[in-house]
Amino acid sequence: MNHLSKKKCTPCQGGIPPLGETEINPYLIRLANWQVIEQHHLLKSFTFPDFKSALAFVNQIGVLAEEENHHPNINFTWGKVEVSIWTHKIDGLHENDFILAAKIDRLL
């Protein structure tokens, strides 16, 4: 498997099963501090010194999400950004989720 951040998200057609626990682990070990929640989605919190920095990071994620055509859920407040990623068409995790997570980490 190539480094995840160098891969491109591919369109998901749906109708395929989400990744199972044994399929998730090889991807997860390639990410820094992301959590898998109920084998359904990835979650990570990022901290920043102020609101402006957090907002700038959210905007960078937005640009990346559009480029990859894969859109995370983002919550942010003063100094904190929380990102949650899963593939909605299969209601679970797909390789694309790990690719996007790795690319988000590279924004910092």
Image (tube, grey):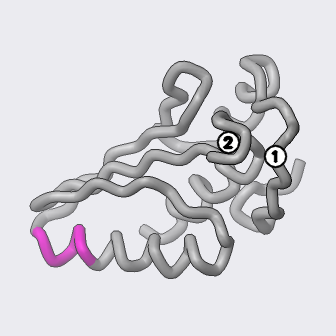
Q: Is residue 91 above or below residue 10?
A: above
The structure residue drawn at horizontal position 79% and vertical position 68%, both measured from the top left corner, is: 8
Q: Amino acid at mark 1?
A: Gly
Residue matched to label 1:
14
Q: Quadrant of the C terminus?
A: bottom left
- Among the 4 quarters of the image, the one containing residue 73: bottom left
Q: CA distance from mark 1 to mark 2?
A: 25 Å
Boundaries of the magenta span: 51-55
The structure residue drawn at horizontal position 52% and vertical position 43%, both measured from the top left corner, is: 32
Q: Give the label on residue 30, or none.
A: 2
The structure residue drawn at horizontal position 12% and vertical position 70%, both measured from the top left corner, is: 51
Q: Is residue 42 above or below residue 65?
A: above
Q: Main secondary structure of the magenta part?
A: helix
Query: Mark 1 vs mark 2: which is more N-terminal?
Result: 1
Discs 1/2, front: 1
* x and y percentages locating residue 88 in the rendered image: 63, 46
Say which element carries label 1: loop
- Work out whether residue 32 or residue 71 is closer to the camera in this orientation and state it: 71
